[in-house]
Image: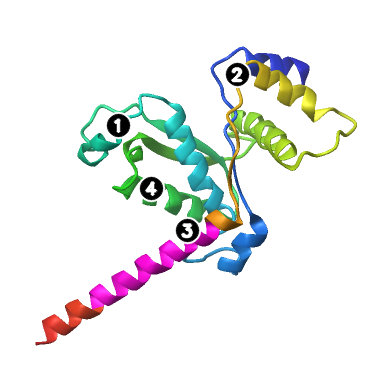
Amino acid sequence: MDQLADLLAGRELWLVSYAIDGVAYKKFARRPKRNEFLGNRYAAPLGGVVGQVCEAMGNTPEPDDWEVLTVGDDWEQCAFFIESSDYDASASETIAGMRADRQLWYRNRIGKEKFGSKSGPGAIPLLQVADLGAYLAAKHRANSPEGRISWRTYYDKLRSAGRVCPTVLADAVSLRKFYEMNEEIKKERAEKLLRLRRDNGR
């Protein structure tokens, strides 16, 4: 662990994390695997992480330029390596939806996603490094007590080296506002579709 932490601290690698209020999210999305609101408990924070990573790449355009960004622009892209699970489909749907969302200025920075395992044939070793990052971020977020092995030692080593980005938290208030906004958009779309059907029926 000491050697791994030293390796990470000495390279251009950053710990990026995003959390949602799980209790609040379950009130808006009751099914474990597929909901209209942010997909599920896995896909919901994934979208936040993708956005943070794209922003962390730097070279952020001014808001006035967002609308004119096109696929043809010369964008450096970020690929996403994800541990395979029952949520692979929803993860792909989330990333594809973000690539197509013209409200997101960084949509063209989102590269391909690849699913794999941490061991065995075709393993992606960096997934083990990502596990360490997720572990440290979760411990820090929860302000967990120390165990047999000190998590704070490794978190502080990475933070001291400037390798830790602040965890973004979608709290209960944020989720409720986003849910209400999502419901309003759904209502407007339904009303628009109804008007179109009425107009076409004349």
In space, the residues marked 1 and 2 are separated at their CA atoms by 25 Å
Residue 32 in which image quadrant: bottom right
Residue at the spot 75% in from the left edge and 38% down from the top edge: 139
Q: Which mark is residue 62?
A: 1
| SS under mark 4 | helix
Q: Which mark is residue 178?
A: 3
- Residue at mark 4: 98
Q: Quadrant of the C terminus?
A: bottom left
- Residue at mark 2: 162
Q: Amino acid at mark 1?
A: Glu
Mark 4 vs 1: CB contact within 8 A? no
Mark 1 vs 2: CB contact within 8 A? no
Of badges 4 and 3, nearer the viewer stands: 3
* Residue 57 visible within the image: yes
Q: Which mark is residue 48?
A: none
Magenta stretch: includes residue 124: no
Disc 2: CA contacts within 10 A as few (<14), some (14-19) or many (>=20): some
Q: Position of residue 162 (x, y in %)?
A: 60, 18
Q: Amino acid at mark 2?
A: Gly
Residue at the spot 35% in from the left edge and 45% down from the top edge: 99
Of badges 4 and 1, nearer the viewer stands: 1
Specify which label sits upstream in the sequence, 1 or 3: 1
In space, the residues marked 4 and 3 are separated at their CA atoms by 16 Å
Specify which label sits upstream in the sequence, 1 or 2: 1
| SS under mark 1 | loop
Magenta segment boundaries in residue numbering: 175-193
Of badges 2 and 3, nearer the viewer stands: 3
Mark 4 vs 2: CB contact within 8 A? no
Q: Residue furthest left?
A: 202
